Image (spheres, rainbow, N blue to C red):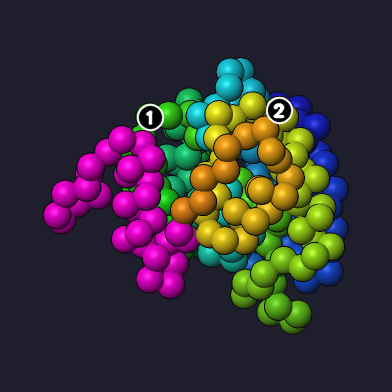
Amino acid sequence: MKTHPFVTAVASLQFEDCFNPYSDRCEIHDRWDAPRRRATALSAMLCRASEEPVDAIWIGRDLGYRGGRRTGLALTDDFHIGQHARRWNLDQAAERPTIGRAVGERTAAVIWGMLEHIDARIFLWNVFPLHPHESGDPFSNRQHNARERRAGEELLQQLIAMLRPSRIVAIGNDAAAAAQRITNSVPVISVRHPSYGGQTQFQKQISELYGRSMSTGSLF
């Protein structure tokens, strides 16, 4: 399918010590056409999400090297790319753009552990839609800088206007601060990031937000 204009704009971003999964190819882990695969999958999801208003955009901070760098999908690792595609009825987007063994990401596992119990139309995104890494170490994570944040926030504003969410669920303080800076027309709900000991609180907050109850030994 034709690349969505929004994805084209994301693919055009270039910053030092950043991997753009929609235009860059990892020589170690990627299929030969991985950038095209990732851009096509994201374009298809955007088209589906644009068909009618979404309940929420869940926003993280950046793509991680074990997750979105590989899949091109925010808060999604190799193990959940099929689940993400099926959520939008897009079986053709379920194939991994990477080679070798599947790689998991802890944050993605917690996020999708909750999403599998929620039927609402939820779009996943990040404040900065690329993978920022330490200089000389492409398989590391760093927080985006101010220049990168400004570029990401401009795109986030466009995404909000396009998808018309009823609310934004900001995962972590950095995501919440960015979301509150760029919009005053959509409610921003801040939840704990599931990493660094925040998993239980994140699960509790999401459960309450979506009217679920948690029971001992399971998420719901």
Q: Quadrant of the N terminus?
A: top right
Magenta-drawn segment: 192-220
Question: Counting other residues with Cα less than 10 Å from the Cα at mark 1, is it few (<14), some (14-19), or many (20 or more)?
Answer: few
Tell me the number on the disc at residue 60: none
Magenta stretch encompasses residue 39: no
* Residue for point 55% across, 29% down: 166
Mark 1 element type? loop
Mark 2 element type? helix
Coordinates of residue 178 in the picture (x, y in percent) = 68, 53
Q: CA distance from mark 2 to mark 1?
A: 21 Å
Q: Amino acid at mark 2?
A: Met
Vertical placement of residue 16 versus 102, above or below: below
The quadrant where residue 107 appears: bottom left
Q: Which residue is mark 1?
A: 119
Q: In the picture provided, is 12 more to the left or to the right than 71?
A: right
Q: Amino acid at mark 1?
A: Asp
Magenta stretch encompasses residue 203: yes
Tell me the number on the disc at residue 162: 2
* Residue for point 38% across, 40% down: 209
The quadrant where residue 41 appears: top right
* Residue for point 61% across, 55% down: 175
Vertical placement of residue 134 versus 123, above or below: below
Residue at the bottom extreme? 136
Q: In the picture provided, is 217 more to the left or to the right than 205?
A: left
